[in-house]
Image (cartoon, rainbow, N blue to C red):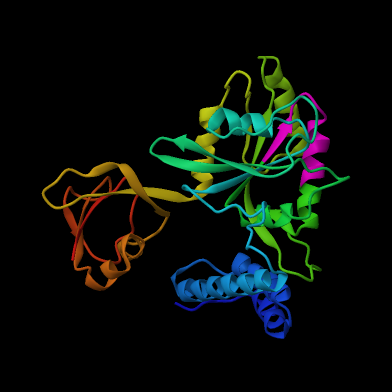
Amino acid sequence: MPANLSPQYLEAEKRYREARTPEAKIEALEEMLAIIPRHKGTDKLQADLKRRLSKHRDQSQKKKGGAKQKPVFSIDKEGAAQIAVIGPPNTGKSSLIAKLTHASPEIADFPHTTHMPTPGMAPYEDIQFQLVDTPPITKDYIDPLMADLIRRADIVVILLDLAADTLQQFEDTLSILETFRIFPEGFPVPKDLRKPHFIKKILVAINKMDEPKDEEDFKIFLELTEMKLPCLGISIHTGKNLLEFLEKLYDLSHIIRVYSKTPGKEPDMNEPFVIPKESTLDDLATKIHKDFVKKLKYARIWGKSVHDGQMVHREYVMQDGDIVEIHI
């Protein structure tokens, strides 16, 4: 499968070749990884980029001397997807993470309580999402390291306050993201950008819908914004729509769950393999173990789109909820 690398990628690759410092090479490699097409044709290239990135980061740390320390804004991904929860001060970001996960971010009624990102794992059915609480962003100030954190996240949640000027909060947040060359999926991208841009799946959540009367204000907000992004009204205080919030994250993640089965035994329904939609049996075998790809003969599938125990081959497109019995 051809890589189909974009002009923006090739430009970043050129800057990488011309870079003379580890820091410059790191910046170029991070951009290349962020914009490279995600498909089987680029798997080896992605792995090579990650290897080079790790190498240059090590060089950069050695040059600075002392013990190697991980930047506080660099959060290792865990779970089915990493979700960066961003927004203005006091919209309830920390409260949302505390409500849905076992994390304990500092919560207060005054702004700028959160100074560094705090991850927590939110259970949803038989998988977990990694929610990352972040420092507030405003047009007056945003930590420059936030840009990289948002770019790396699989999904971005913009959390707003229905009791405040919600429309202004929304417009300001989109404007701030644009300064980082981050754009919602489906939105137009300026043609005069000189550096690569980043397209993100974005969910807008409107907090503090604590009373029935707040529904009208929510509808007005949707009308004023002509909302083209997934949007949900929630109440962290009452728990309103928090399950629906996780369901929307699942839909946006574009993933499926597949369960494994050993021949002659019952399937393991507790820990599914989480893979992108449209993944094939071959893709699943790669994720389970690299040797499976070479030795894979066929698999039997139990699922909605096949007969129970139907034999399938490498090209079979996995479906959400499939139970797979691999034969090697």
Vertical placement of 195 versus 307: above or below?
A: below
Residue 67 included in the magenta stretch of the image: no
Q: Is residue 248 left or right of residue 35?
A: left
Pick out the residue farthest to the top.
Answer: 212
Pick out the residue farthest to the bottom.
Answer: 18
Residue toward you, 246 or 171 = 246
Residue 53, picture quadrant: bottom right
Q: Which residues are magenta?
A: 158-173
Residue 172 included in the magenta stretch of the image: yes
Residue toward you, 266 or 63 = 63
**Residue at image location 73% in from the left, 81% down from the top:** 19
Residue 277, picture quadrant: bottom left
Q: Is residue 140 left or right of residue 314?
A: right
Number of numbered discs on residues: 0
Q: Position of residue 107 (x, y in %)?
A: 69, 28
Q: Position of residue 202 (x, y in %)?
A: 64, 46
Q: Position of residue 41 (x, y in %)?
A: 46, 74
Q: Is residue 187 visible?
A: no
**Residue at image location 68% in from the left, 32% down from the top:** 106
Residue 245, picture quadrant: top right
**Residue at image location 59% in from the left, 30% down from the top:** 98
Q: Is residue 156 visible?
A: yes
Vertical placement of 207 versus 53: above or below?
A: above
Pick out the residue farthest to the left.
Answer: 264
Q: Position of residue 123 (x, y in %)?
A: 46, 36
